[in-house]
Amino acid sequence: MENKKNSFFKNLLSIRGMGSSLIAFVALILIYVAFGLSEPNVFSTTNILNLLRSMSKYLLIGIGQSYILITGNIDLSIGSVVGMSAMISATLMSSGLNPVLSLLIALACCLLIGLINGVLVGKFMLPPFIATLGTMFVARGIAYMVNGNRNTNAISTGLGKESAQRVQDFFYYGKTLGIYNTFFIALIIFIVFFFILSKTRTGRHIYAIGSNIEAAKLSGISVFAITTKAYMISAFCSAVVGFILCGQAGMGNMEAGNMYEMYGVAAGVIGGVSPLGGTGLLLGTFAGAAVWQTLENGLNLIGAQVGIQRIVIGVIVVLSVLLDVLVRSGSKIRIKKQKI
């Protein structure tokens, strides 16, 4: 029996990125308990529910950015796509257009940005930093222009109070089984994209490209197609976060999603997704998003200044990446010694 247990744990830890994911979950528990001992309100039901709802936005952004990071790229347009999604959907709804149609139009616009990113990076081989920096400005510009360089009116002005309330309840204020719908939306999307990344050919190709793009090309993998899929997944997740922010505010804000691309990077790398490509699990991204939100929530409850919050999270992100670099360096040294 003991041998079976040892074998199970060995197999579990042999999964690429599982060790980092487990470390992130352990860190999450320790951080949460530490804050709870300092401030008992951390353990309250209300705080836990709010924590899950707020974490959901970081989880969704983290999913999209993790897909991109695993391919060895980055997506700087995420935050602007979030803002564009919120502004387009809110502008259309405040004008009286059907909510479902409004959301679908906004989603289509966001997916178009993802497609453009995929073409620029996967087809024309532009450095992802430059390509997505450009689309970041384009998407934010659209967010500004769609309603004439001003935030939208309340969506209730076009849809009516009851219809607007349904939209807001679905994406933000409503609950199912006592838990905010926002968390269930994020959880369902997480499960779908976790399955794609871990159990499908597309997922294997994403890892292959991030591990060694030249070897992936030689094995017949379409770098263009896979890179484009990854960027469109990122755009999809960003669009959903835009809907959540629209539901939260009941209107569109031109600055919605500001800096969210960095939040996505933080959620991924804290959870063990390597910014160097080829390594990481969405399970770790889940833990990373939870760590990020728990830190933000706990530091806020104990009265830490916003500047302190940013410094703490920034240090953790740097340490996470440094740990990844050191682990990779150690692995390369061991491989060289084995060859000798």
Image: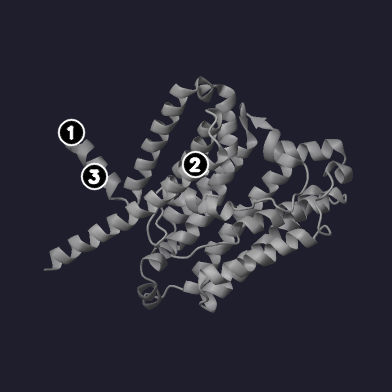
The residue tagged 1 is 2
Residue 174's spot in the image, x, y percent?
A: 69, 33
Specify the amino acid type for callout 3. Lys
Residue 324 image-quadrant placement: bottom left
Can residue 286 be seen by looking at this rendering? no
Residue 182's spot in the image, x, y percent?
A: 63, 39
In this rendered view, identify the residue nearer to me: 16 or 137. 137
Looking at the rendered image, the disc whose residue lies closer to the viewer, 2 or 1, is 2
Residue 192's spot in the image, x, y percent?
A: 52, 49
The residue tagged 3 is 10
Looking at the rendered image, the disc whose residue lies closer to the viewer, 1 or 3, is 3
The residue tagged 2 is 292
Specify the amino acid type for callout 1. Glu
Q: CA distance from mark 2 to mark 1?
A: 36 Å
253 up-or-down from 290: above or below: below
Which element carries disc 2, helix, strand or loop? helix
Residue at 50% across, 77% down: 125
Residue at 76% across, 52% down: 89
Q: Quadrant of the N terminus?
A: top left
Residue at 53% across, 37% down: 296
